[in-house]
Image: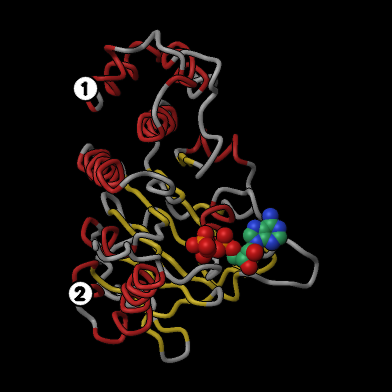
Amino acid sequence: MSTTTAGDVAVHRGAPEGNPLLAATDVFAGYLPGVDILNGCNLVVHPGELVGIIGPNGAGKSTLLKALFGLVRIREGSVTLKDEDITNHRADSLVRRGVGFVPQTNNVFPSLSIEENLQMGLYQAPKRFEERFAFIVDLFPTLGDRRKQRAGSLSGGERQMVAMARALMMDPSVLLLDEPSAGLSPVRQDETFIRTRKINKAGVSVVIVEQNARRALQICDRAYVLDQGRNAYSGPGRELMNDPKVIELYLGTLAADVEAAASAAPTAEPEA
Ligand SMILES: Nc1ncnc2c1ncn2[C@@H]1O[C@H](COP(=O)(O)OP(=O)(O)OP(=O)(O)O)[C@@H](O)[C@H]1O
């Protein structure tokens, strides 16, 4: 079924038919006892999809990703991968089953070389190194050229590329990306979105949490808008981008914030 409803919200609008690869159903989770950050979240990812999660600050986007990867305990609800229950499974077991996760920060070992970082990503299957490294270099040739360079000497965007590559070493069927464009310049952000699309085109399903909502919607097949730990809207990326309600509530607000920040910035004195 492509569309189910929670209350009056169509939660998986535009999703393909068939069984999803990854599904979160009515998930409640939080960090502190008795305080839920996720209040019944739903998400499905079908094979080959690039799915975005956007929404205002504090909506629970990163928390949902961490809950999918066993880093935040789910109190109620379930997560399945290929119809198997993986709710609250440990991260190492999820990696073995084909789930990759790229955290927002501290996502490379700075004192290790690019090659050693990639080896760390494959510690559960070291014999596959050459085969997986060839796949990575095909995707990101620069990592092959610079394989001996220390990760700590790379730029933010390059580190993000190494972090993605490391998560890809285990040949995941789904990759979870937590705000990969955070802290990067607009040009480097663009490169990160292009890289994400490239990974997806290589056959890996992707879930991407993003603050840069407009840019994320441009590359996503579908996206979910979260608000206060609940599903607010969902649909094909380009449809959401042009949805007046989504623009008013989420995209419009961002544009207004940028304008407000720009007009609050000190202006240069007129020349005498
Ligand atoms: N480790 C933590 N301990 C306690 N509360 C946390 C922790 N991490 C996040 N939170 C709280 O959970 C709520 C949701 O945070 P989350 O990072 O999931 O939001 P988000 O939608 O990803 O927001 P942003 O776009 O600002 O990153 C916030 O109120 C945040 O303060």
Locate residue 159, reporting x and y percent.
42, 30
Q: Which residue is mark 2?
A: 239
SS assignment at label 2: helix
Q: Which amino acid type is shown beneath numbered disc 1?
A: Asp
Q: Is residue 30 something that shows in the picture?
A: yes
Quarter assignment of residue 76: bottom right
Locate residue 31, reporting x and y percent.
72, 61
Q: Is residue 88 left or right of residue 256?
A: right
Q: Is residue 91 left or right of residue 17?
A: right
Quadrant of ligand 1 in image:
bottom right
Looking at marks 2 and 1 on the same chain, the residue that comes earlier in the sequence is marked by 1
- Is ligand 1 within 8 Å of the beta carbon of the residue shown at mark 2? no
Locate residue 5, reporting x and y percent.
41, 84
- Look at the picture and state if 8 lies above or below 188: below
Locate residue 263, reporting x and y percent.
35, 73
- Look at the picture and state if 52 lies above or below 203: below
User: In which quadrant will I find the N terminus?
Assistant: bottom left
Q: Which residue is mark 1?
A: 138
Q: Is residue 1 something that shows in the picture?
A: no
Mark 2 and mark 1 residues within 8 Å of each other at the beta carbon: no
- Look at the picture and state if 147 lies above or below 27: above
- Tell me the residue at 55%/77% (across/down): 228
Q: CA distance from mark 2 to mark 1?
A: 33 Å
Q: How is the image coloured?
A: secondary structure
User: In which quadrant will I find the C terminus?
Assistant: bottom left
Between residues 24 and 108, which one lies in front from this camera angle?
108
Q: Residues within 10 Å of mark 2 (few under 14, many from 20)?
A: some
Quarter assignment of residue 118: top left
- Tell me the residue at 38%/53% (across/down): 208
SS assignment at label 1: helix
Q: Which amino acid type is shown beneath numbered disc 2?
A: Glu
